[in-house]
Amino acid sequence: MPTVIEPKIISGNSNLRLSQAIAKRMSLYRGMSVGLVDARVERFNDQEIFVEVFENVRGEDMFILQSTSNPANDNLMELLIMSDALRRSSAARITAVIPYFGYARQDRRTKARTPITAKLVANMIDEAGIERVLTMDLHAAQIQGFFDMPVDNLYASPIFALDVLNQFKDMSDVMVVSPDVGGVARARELAKRIGAPLSIVDKRREKAGEVAEMTVIGEVAGKRCIIVDDICDTAGTLCKAAEVLMGHGATEVHAYITHGVLSGPAVERITKSVMKTLVITDSIQATEAVTSAPNIRIVPTAPMFAQAILNIWNGTSVSSLFETDTLGPIYEGIL
């Protein structure tokens, strides 16, 4: 048993760039080298996942870094199998750091004979031996209650607020827009942080993924509008909301989205849309198409996640990272 239990991080394949950035920031914060645990996460020819940890982790405080993004099932299984490997190697505690928690959109039964998959995934994580979850911007806050373990849900809004204040300078004509009624609380949080008014785009769906009608609630004429949401998948709704806002007299439309799923035609739609910029975090590893898009910009989450991991390890407050006074110095010179 080590005299001093150090935080050790191990990464799956879903977002290695973010994992390496978190390790680098932790090294900077601690003044000593923090690297990823040496391991291999590979596949047999039939795509079964195999995990082997090459370092001793007995009695260690382990943090598994893995987003359950596309391919969601493969990345989820990697997370579960890595946890099983660490548990059987006598790790003292296992925390899953899941920057993007997949299946979160299936958090309730919208129709008869449909699953609540977010709860199923929570049960699987619990059974794998994970004792704590650290994530960012869960699609619905009640998902925390699906787990029988502590869940720390970080928010991107403090990071976005710092970026908005840095990019926009003059805030007199800025308006925050929620793309639907369900996202009002998230948009209100950003609006409060930057001192801007709030508007809503109310949408009516005929079926999943297809918007029939949009109505703007609030006066957006002459405003630079910032759409705020947690997930952008195919970007159809986002681009249509931007068009509706411009049609109601907005001078510019920008969007701040936590998780850039950006599947299918999303990048092409965004590139051709009336949106001036789309800002996403690196919770999902960006494709080459995303990084090369002229109007998509990525803000880093590694500084926040690195500090949150260290706070969990040493038993200090994670919610302190929601405050600008705490987060500002961490992001100084980055945004």
Image (cartoon, rainbow, N blue to C red):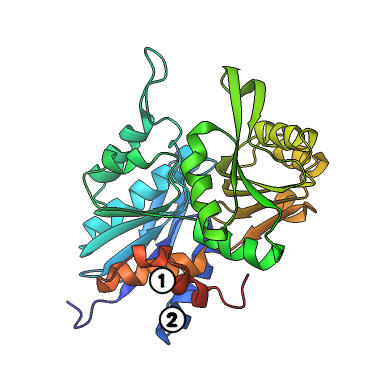
Q: Is residue 188 left or right of residue 165?
A: left
Q: Is residue 327 above or below residue 214?
A: below
- Give the secondary structure at mark 2: helix
Residue 222 in the image: state x and y as whole percent.
77, 46
Instruction: Kindly identify which numbered label has been placed on residue 34.
Output: none
Do the CB atoms of the residues marked 1 and 2 lie less than 8 Å apart? yes
Instruction: Give the residue pinned by disc 1.
Output: 307
Residue nearest the observer in this picture, 171 or 112: 171
Residue nearest the observer in this picture, 6 or 54: 6
Q: Is residue 70 above or below residue 189?
A: above
Residue 116 position by quadrant: top left
Q: Amino acid at mark 1?
A: Gln
Instruction: Give the residue pinned by disc 2.
Output: 29
- Give me the residue at 29% from left, 76% from top: 6
Q: Is residue 265 left or right of residue 80?
A: right
- Give me the residue at 73% from left, 38% from top: 242
Residue 9 position by quadrant: bottom left
- Give me the residue at 36% from left, 67% from top: 320
Residue 76 in the image: state x and y as whole percent.
42, 43
How packed mark 1 is, by other alpha carbons closer than 10 Å (few <14, some 14-19, many 20 or more), is many
Residue 7 in the image: state x and y as whole percent.
32, 72
How packed mark 2 is, by other alpha carbons closer than 10 Å (few <14, some 14-19, many 20 or more), is some
Residue 104 in the image: state x and y as whole percent.
43, 37
- Give me the residue at 32% from left, 33% from top: 120
Residue closest to the far top: 112
Q: Is residue 223 left or right of residue 31?
A: right
Residue 210 position by quadrant: top right
Mark 1–mark 2 Cα distance, whole angstroms, equals 8 Å
Q: Is residue 286 left or right of residue 184?
A: right
